[in-house]
């Protein structure tokens, strides 16, 4: 069977050819740091993509294993002097693998866009060399992943039901029993149990806009997220409250859905485009000062809609207008902090960057500036702020062994700061650090930037 080779498209070739093999990205790569293997470095993965583009290797075996082991953290992009857009290359490789169809829940692109126009299929399968990076035996199976992706994440009601089930599990004390038993079970289950935050079912009232407090400065639209909404409702409430305190009326556009990050990570470009179009429709209108989100992974996905829909004549322009308004809450507040926090919060704090906020959106100074603005906060940096925490979407569930090694490196860094509060800015990182605190026996609380800000406002009375 002969198919068009997606990695051999001219725009992808150009991106691949930008890599000059200098290797400066290698020290920034978490998987290379752990394994010290060229094929698990950015340069090695780009070489594999080039070999697949040439038709010298197939998309299964070694190719898929090394691509699957990549966290997608994009630290290599920040380190690269040649401007290689590794994130887009990885997305293309995943769509190409996904489009093979077998069990990854992927579909080829029906509408046609700049990146994912065709299906790739070529060459013979390559056996994996050396170390195997096969997913954990009890990691979510592809069909389960596809179910979660299509039948759970875009449906807020179903996710909230799941949250209720988790809360019941926590209330019945099963968590304590499970923690005694789970260390003997596969790492994916241990991770899943450990990363569940205390569930707070006090969801936002989205039936009407949240009014501005004090001088009204404009309207913002709030992207609530899917997992964030169901499992970390306190972060959403704090986000809205902080926006209100700074003079913004917060709107909750109906019909919004999951950002599409998980769909892209699993190579399902068709579904990712459907979600993007739905969100663009939901946030239509020009009255918003900004479209605010509070999760680095979601924000990076939302900001990628223009690229994803570049080939869609009905949505390309609307996608560009949408992207122009999307801002992470820290990014927005850095320029719109009309009501600086004055309440004292005496705490030694460290900030764990969200990779998709730091490397994907280039937002790293803003959250730090906000934390330093809180009286009493002593911000202590980790030694390697560029490094991923191992969360990476559902990476910690499908690749738990590698994720735990990456997490342990991060925990050693966090422990050295002596911080009693770990602040982060992404759903996955937040839950990974909750798991990390338990795993590492740290005496620390995990908070989002806005939760610490809100604590300061509350202390001011
Ligand atoms: S995205 Fe992260 S894990 Fe993947 S190659 Fe780049 S630095 Fe390494
Ligand atoms: S730093 Fe950039 S150019 Fe150098 S090897 Fe890595 S991806 Fe290629």
Image (tube, helix red, strand yellow):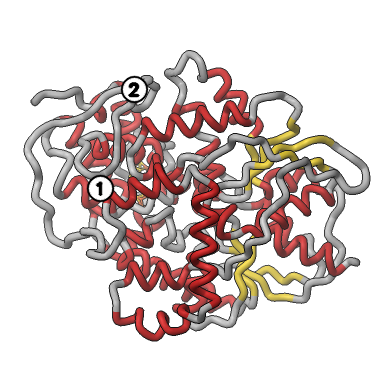
Residue at the image position 44 percent from the left and 60 percent from the top: 391
Query: CA–CA distance between discs 1 and 2?
Result: 31 Å
Q: Which residue is mark 1?
A: 44
Q: Which mark is residue 376?
A: none
Residue at the image position 45 percent from the left and 30 percent from the top: 274
- Quarter of the image containing the N terminus? top left
Residue at the image position 35 percent from the left and 70 percent from the top: 189
Please, is residue 455 above or below residue 315 in the view? below
SS at mark 1 in the image: helix
SS at mark 2 in the image: loop
* Residue with the most extreme right position: 215
Please, is residue 395 above or below residue 199 in the view? above
Q: Residues within 10 Å of mark 1 (few under 14, many from 20)?
A: some
Q: Which mark is residue 110?
A: 2
Where residue 12 sits: x, y (%)? 32, 28
The reply to whether residue 329 is visible in this rendering is yes
Which image quadrant is residue 271 in? top left
Name the one closer to the observer, 143 or 452. 143
On the rendered structure, is 113 left or right of 120?
A: right
The disc, 1 or 2, on the residue closer to the chain's N-terminal end is 1
Which image quadrant is residue 137 in? bottom left
Q: How many marks?
A: 2
Which image quadrant is residue 322 in? top right
On the rendered structure, is 358 left or right of 400?
A: right
């Amino acid at each position: 069977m002969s198919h068009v080779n997606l990695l051999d498209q001219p725009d992808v070739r150009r991106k691949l050819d930008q890599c000059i093999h200098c290797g400066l990205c290698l020290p920034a790569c978490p998987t290379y740091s752990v394994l010290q293997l060229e094929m698990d470095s950015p340069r090695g993965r780009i070489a594999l993509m080039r070999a697949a583009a040439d038709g010298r290797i197939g998309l299964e075996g070694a190719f898929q294993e090394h691509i699957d082991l990549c966290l997608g953290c994009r630290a290599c992009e920040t380190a690269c002097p040649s401007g290689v857009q590794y994130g887009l290359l990885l997305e293309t490789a995943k769509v190409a693998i996904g489009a093979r169809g077998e069990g990854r829940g992927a579909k080829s692109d029906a509408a046609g866009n700049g990146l994912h126009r065709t299906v790739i299929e070529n060459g013979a399968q390559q056996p994996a060399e050396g170390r195997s990076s096969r997913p954990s035996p009890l990691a979510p199976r592809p069909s389960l992943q596809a179910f979660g992706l299509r039948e759970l994440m875009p449906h807020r009601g179903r996710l909230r039901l799941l949250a209720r089930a988790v809360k019941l599990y926590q209330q019945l004390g099963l968590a304590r029993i499970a923690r005694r038993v789970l260390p003997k079970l596969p790492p994916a289950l241990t991770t899943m149990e450990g990363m569940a935050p205390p569930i707070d079912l006090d969801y936002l009232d989205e039936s009407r806009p949240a009014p501005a407090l004090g001088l009204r400065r404009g309207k913002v639209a709030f992207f609530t997220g899917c997992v964030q909404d169901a499992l970390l409702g306190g972060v959403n409430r704090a986000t809205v409250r902080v926006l209100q305190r700074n003079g913004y009326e917060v709107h909750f556009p109906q019909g919004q859905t999951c950002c599409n990050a998980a769909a892209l990570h699993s190579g399902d470009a068709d579904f990712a485009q459907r979600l993007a179009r739905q969100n663009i429709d939901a946030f239509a209108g020009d009255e918003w000062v900004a479209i605010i989100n509070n999760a680095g992974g979601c924000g990076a996905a939302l900001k990628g809609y223009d690229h994803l829909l570049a080939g869609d004549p009905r949505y390309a322009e609307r996608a560009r207008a949408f992207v122009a308004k999307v801002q992470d809450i820290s990014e927005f507040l850095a320029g719109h902090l009309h009501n600086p926090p004055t309440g004292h919060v005496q705490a030694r704090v460290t900030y764990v960057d969200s990779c998709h906020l730091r490397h994907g959106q280039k937002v790293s100074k803003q959250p730090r500036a906000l934390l330093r603005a809180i009286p009493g906060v002593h911000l202590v940096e980790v030694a390697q702020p560029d490094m991923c925490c191992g969360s990476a979407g559902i990476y910690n569930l499908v690749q738990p062994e590698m994720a735990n090694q990456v997490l342990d490196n991060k925990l050693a860094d966090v422990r050295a700061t002596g911080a009693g509060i770990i602040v982060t800015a992404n759903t996955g990182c937040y839950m990974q650090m909750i798991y990390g605190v338990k795993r590492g026996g740290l005496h620390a609380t995990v908070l989002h930037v806005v939760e610490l800000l809100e604590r300061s406002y509350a202390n001011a009375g």
